[in-house]
Image (spheres, helix red, strand yellow):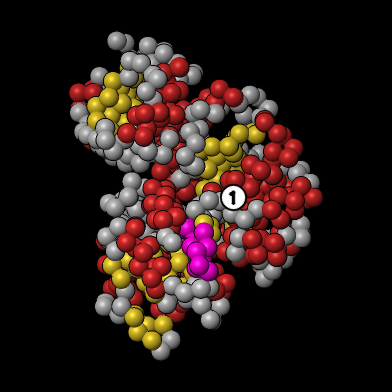
């Protein structure tokens, strides 16, 4: 078959076409992006091979969702060089590192390497609003979408790194619509290859994360900066003006730059205290916690830029109490509050939850924290300090991060809060962790799942971890 793309990965055609091409999907995954990619390619006449290191058993939920598609060839539990040698186009999962030897083999044979987000940016007919950040990006993305829907209705589309494939949105998007996408550092690494950035870029913060995937913090920051790197002078960058790293990064942006603040201290001159301006500062603190001020402020700033009335913004913010599995109270049993914060996959996120619920619980009630898991080569010092100061009982899930937490807190085998000394509980399943936490709790106490670590090993992903937490809590009497 004649190649349509050059070996240096530059497009020869104006548009990426898939009809009758041999397309290899590398990494099916469990979050919906891989399934969405396969659906998209199948409708465009591609000859599809799917390869994933996970087994058919591990991928069962995704495979069931694709059962209606015929003619898909699956190579599971391994990758084979010959499959990459034969591909015209490789669509890689965002989690696949760009230095993969299998991708190198495909390139040597003239294949085009792309990703779902690369295809989306290549073919989307509407302006894109892209949101990234280490923490708060999902909330910012959701709020921007909700705000814009009050004006644009069904013409505003919502997807990306939120278990909703961006490619499944493409057939619905028309010129004059708006696409709101959450973008991870992995997806933005892929966008560097496409040399494209969204029309409106939003960055919430840059904190240490995914250093088990990125080579170092500099590489992680570089990935995040792709969201504005290829913008044009009439594009816009909105960033959290209280983040020192972002203030330095924004100085290199080629677009129009907007520094946004959600705090009273920073709200002066060009850094507008936008939450105060719309009268929603107190509402955000009450409904979400003050650590969500930057996310809410950025969403409000983008909405006001696109002429969404302040009254519509106030109405939505007053009713919004956060996304599922982000400091979400899922049950109260015999007066004990159960909080699902499974998406706290970094120490910084866990610290925010610990501090918030310490304040809510007050001096007279306990915080029982379920934490630990897989290590992403992050710094646990601040989380250790928060545990020592604010956590009354600690239940630890297995994983390399758990060892780091114990080392940093110097609580092996004991930790201190106030004048008391308690031994952490080790649990090898979520069911046992919840049982141990519930035994330690009394009326008015808070059982908080905020791991501060990744979920791999014991769970399929953080959402599986949250689902198991909720299932275990439901069984408590």
Q: Quick check: is 221 in the magenta stretch?
A: no
Q: Main secondary structure of the magenta part?
A: strand
The residue depicted at 47 percent of the width and 48 percent of the height is: 224
The residue depicted at 67 percent of the width and 71 percent of the height is: 265
The answer to whether residue 415 is seen in the rendering is yes
Above or below for 295 versus 63: below
The residue depicted at 28 percent of the width and 29 percent of the height is: 51
Q: Which residues are magenta?
A: 331-341
- Say few, some or many: other residues with alpha carbon within 10 Å of mark 1 (under 14 / 14 to 19 / 20 or more): many
Q: Quick check: is 338 in the magenta stretch?
A: yes
Name the image quarter holding residue 189: top left
Depth check: 399 or 227 in front? 399
- Left or right: residue 54 versus residue 360 is left
Residue 13 placement (x, y as % from top left): 45, 17
Image quadrant occupied by the N terminus: top left
Please, what secondary structure does the residue beneath circle 1 have? helix
The residue depicted at 32 percent of the width and 41 percent of the height is: 97
Residue 120 placement (x, y as % from top left): 50, 29
Residue 306 placement (x, y as % from top left): 72, 42
Depth check: 339 or 315 in front? 339
- Left or right: residue 190 versus residue 168 is left
Mark 1 sits on what residue? 140
């Amino acid at each position: 078959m004649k190649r349509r793309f050059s070996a240096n990965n530059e497009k020869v055609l104006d548009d990426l076409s898939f009809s009758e091409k041999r397309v290899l999907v590398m990494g099916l995954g469990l979050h919906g992006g891989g399934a969405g990619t396969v659906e998209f390619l199948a409708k465009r006449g591609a000859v599809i091979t799917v390869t994933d290191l996970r087994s058919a058993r591990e991928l069962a939920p995704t495979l069931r969702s694709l059962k209606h598609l015929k003619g898909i060839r699956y190579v599971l539990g391994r990758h084979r060089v010959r499959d990459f040698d034969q591909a015209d186009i490789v669509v890689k999962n965002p989690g696949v590192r760009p230095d993969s030897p299998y991708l190198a083999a495909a390139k040597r044979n003239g294949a085009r390497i792309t990703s779902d987000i690369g295809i989306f940016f290549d073919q989307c007919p509407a302006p894109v609003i892209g949101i990234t950040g280490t923490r708060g990006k999902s909330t910012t993305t959701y709020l921007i979408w909700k705000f814009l829907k009050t004006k644009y209705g069904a013409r505003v589309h919502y997807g990306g790194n939120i278990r909703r494939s961006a490619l499944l949105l493409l057939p619905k998007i028309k010129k004059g619509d708006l696409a709101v996408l959450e973008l991870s550092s992995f997806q933005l690494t892929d966008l560097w290859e496409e040399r494209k950035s969204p029309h409106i870029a939003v960055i919430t913060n840059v904190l240490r994360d995914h250093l088990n995937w990125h080579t170092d913090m500099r590489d992680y920051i570089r990935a995040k900066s792709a969201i504005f790197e290829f913008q044009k002078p009439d594009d816009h960058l909105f960033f959290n003006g209280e983040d020192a790293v972002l203030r330095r990064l924004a100085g290199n942006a080629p677009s129009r730059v907007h520094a946004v603040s959600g705090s009273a201290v920073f709200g002066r001159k060009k850094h507008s205290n936008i939450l105060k301006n719309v009268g929603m500062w107190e509402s955000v603190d009450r409904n979400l916690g003050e650590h969500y001020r930057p996310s809410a402020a950025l969403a409000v700033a983008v909405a006001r830029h696109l002429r969404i009335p302040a009254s519509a913004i106030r109405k939505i913010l007053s009713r919004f109490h956060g996304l599922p599995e982000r400091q979400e109270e899922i049950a109260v049993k015999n007066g004990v509050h159960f909080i699902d914060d499974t998406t706290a996959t970094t120490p910084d996120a866990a610290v925010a939850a610990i501090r918030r619920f310490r304040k809510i619980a007050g001096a007279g009630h306990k915080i029982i924290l379920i934490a630990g898991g897989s290590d992403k080569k992050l710094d646990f010092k601040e989380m250790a300090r928060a545990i020592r100061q604010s956590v009354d009982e600690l239940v630890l899930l297995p994983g390399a991060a758990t060892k780091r937490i114990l080392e940093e807190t110097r609580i092996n085998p004991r930790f201190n809060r106030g004048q008391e000394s308690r031994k952490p509980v080790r649990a090898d399943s979520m069911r046992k962790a919840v049982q141990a936490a519930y035994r330690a709790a009394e009326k008015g106490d808070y059982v908080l799942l905020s791991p501060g670590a990744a979920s791999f090993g014991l769970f399929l992903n953080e959402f599986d971890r949250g689902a198991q937490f909720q299932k275990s809590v439901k069984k408590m009497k």
